[in-house]
Amino acid sequence: MTDTRPWSQDQDHLLASLLDEIVPANADGRVTAAGALGVAEFLAGKASADPELAASLRTVLSRAAALAEASGARFDDLDAAGRIGIVKALEREAPDAFTALLWHTYMGYYSRADVRPQFGLSPRPTQPEGYELPEDDPDELADMLAPVRGRGRRYRPA
């Protein structure tokens, strides 16, 4: 199998560590962190099909490595405050690239069927066979629409 990642293995490890800071595990460990869950795989797949995303992620990874190196340690060797400081610096110094990372991280994390039950949601996708929704109460709908209907037509016929 060919590796399609648009970054090195070291950068892939750094990405997983960054993801763990962006979406961390909860204190009791019942909610899995994004890096530990493998969201880097999702990002690699998206980046291999989107050169702009790949460039944004490479920007974040190279800047994160430089910031960690400037602090005298690898990202993983920093304490929690040091790692969070780097994430905050990335957000300030490369806002567009960081936003792309954040957006796609959330997409990759919260779209997984094995994540949604950790938050009390159905493992089914939201659409087309998504969550069960109760039927609207006809009386409640009538009450909500009464003021609108009472105003009469407010548009010109086409």
Image (tube, grey):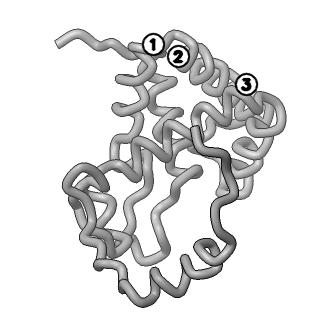
In percent of width and height, residue 31 lies at 39, 67
Question: Which residue is under mark 2?
Answer: 54
**Rendered view: 70 above or below 38:** above
The amino acid type, in three-letter code, at marker 1 is Pro
**As rendered, which of 16 and 74 lies closer to the eye?**
16
Question: Which residue is under mark 3?
Answer: 66
In percent of width and height, residue 28 lies at 42, 77
Q: Earlier along the polypeptide chain: callout 3 or callout 2?
A: 2
For residue 142, the mark is none
The amino acid type, in three-letter code, at marker 2 is Ala
In percent of width and height, residue 157 lies at 59, 44
Residue shown at 56%/40% (left/top)?
A: 103
User: Could you tell me how far apart the alpha carbons at marks 3 and 2 are, in whole angstroms?
Assistant: 18 Å
The local secondary structure at tag 3 comes to helix
Picture mark count: 3
Q: In the picture provided, is 40 more to the left or to the right than 63?
A: left
The amino acid type, in three-letter code, at marker 3 is Ala
Disc 1 to disc 3: CB gap under 8 Å: no
**Rendered view: 58 above or below 86:** above
Quadrant assignment for the N terminus = top left
The answer to which quarter of the image holds residue 56 is top right
For residue 6, the mark is 1
